[in-house]
Each structure stands twice: as C-alpha cells, then as structure tokens.
C-alpha cells in the first residue's frame, strides 16, 4: 500500500472513530504533538494550535450539540503531505449551539477539508470550508405550522 493510500485509510478511520463515534481519547493515535486549525471560518478554534488534550476537548465540545453526527465521505484526494476530504454531514441538534437551544432537528451540512500529515503519518492540522450559513438557516427556520381543527368546525 502506498503512503497516499495509507493516509486515505488513516483519515477515513480517524473520521469514523473520532468524529462519528465520539472516541475523543483515541485521538492520541492520529494527532501529532500539535494540531493547527489554519482556516475554518466560524469555528471557535480557527487559527489556534492545540495540543492533544486541547484537540480532544474540541472534539467533545463540537459533538455535544450533535452527539449522533455522521460524515459521509464523498471523495479523498491526495497531494504531497495532504489529503483533501469532501463530505456531507448530518446530526440531530440535541444540545445548545452558538446561542441556539436544542431543536431536535436533523441538520445537514457539506464541506471540504484539507488535512495535513507529518512524516510519521500523524495529522498536524486542517484547512476547511463548510456551509455554516446553511446550518444557521436550518436552526432558525420556523417549525412547520400545523392547523388543528375540531371535527365539524369550519374555518
């Protein structure tokens, strides 16, 4: 297996175990000593460099609002020391998120993330774009109006 194939497999396993299944403590097996969020507009950690403990805290806090979240990987593309992952995401809004109390709604999002690897195939950071506006719109939309009538009553 080539290094490119190994990194794609490693990234897929990382996404499943850490982000989908919420096994934050397993991050030690994937993350370098430090992990930098180079670009991720709207993410409270954008521009920060985290140690492994900080990365685990980020996973726990990020998943708290959507504990059943799942990534559907659409594509993996490698260049140099990076793997780009395009993805679809969904999760049920069960906890507070940026001032929005839990709605119980299934929320959808899409994005692309460039993950950087070191020479030991550990993740050192990412550069990401996502549809956070779409998430906010889904959280703000009014609940469907249901008109309840008693039998025999006209509007």
Image (spheres, rainbow, N blue to C red):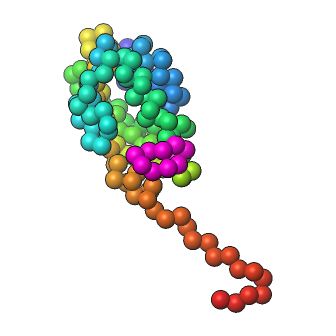
State the residue lying farthest toward the bottom: 154
Q: Going by the image, does 113 lie left or right of 11? A: left
- Give coordinates of residue 153: x percent, y percent: 74, 87
Q: Residue at x 53, y 49 (%)?
A: 102
Q: Is residue 81 visible?
A: yes
Q: Nearer the viewer, residue 18 or 94?
A: 94
99 in magenta = yes
Q: Going by the image, does 71 lie left or right of 37? A: right
Dominant SS in magenta: loop
- Give coordinates of residue 56: x percent, y percent: 42, 22
Q: Going by the image, does 34 lie left or right of 144? A: left
- Give coordinates of residue 111: x percent, y percent: 34, 43
64 in magenta = no
Report the span colored magenta: 93-102
Location of residue 139 by image quarter: bottom left
Name above or below for residue 136 compared with residue 151.
above
Q: Is residue 114 visible?
A: no
Q: Nearer the viewer, residue 49 or 19?
A: 49
């Amino acid at each position: 297996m080539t290094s490119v194939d190994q990194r794609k497999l490693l990234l897929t396993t990382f996404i499943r175990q850490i982000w989908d299944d919420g096994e934050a403590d397993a991050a030690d097996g994937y993350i370098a000593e430090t992990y930098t969020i180079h670009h991720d507009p709207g993410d409270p950690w954008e521009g920060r460099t985290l140690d492994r403990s900080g990365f685990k805290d980020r996973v726990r806090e990020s998943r708290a609002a959507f504990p059943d979240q799942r990534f559907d990987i659409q594509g993996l593309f490698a260049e140099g020391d990076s793997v780009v992952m395009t993805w679809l995401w969904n999760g049920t809004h069960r906890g507070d998120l940026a001032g929005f109390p839990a709605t119980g709604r299934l929320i959808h999002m899409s994005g692309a993330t460039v993950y950087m690897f070191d020479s030991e195939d550990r993740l050192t950071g990412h550069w990401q774009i996502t549809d956070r506006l779409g998430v906010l719109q889904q959280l703000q939309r009014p609940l469907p109006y249901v008109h309840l009538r008693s039998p025999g009553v006209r509007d």
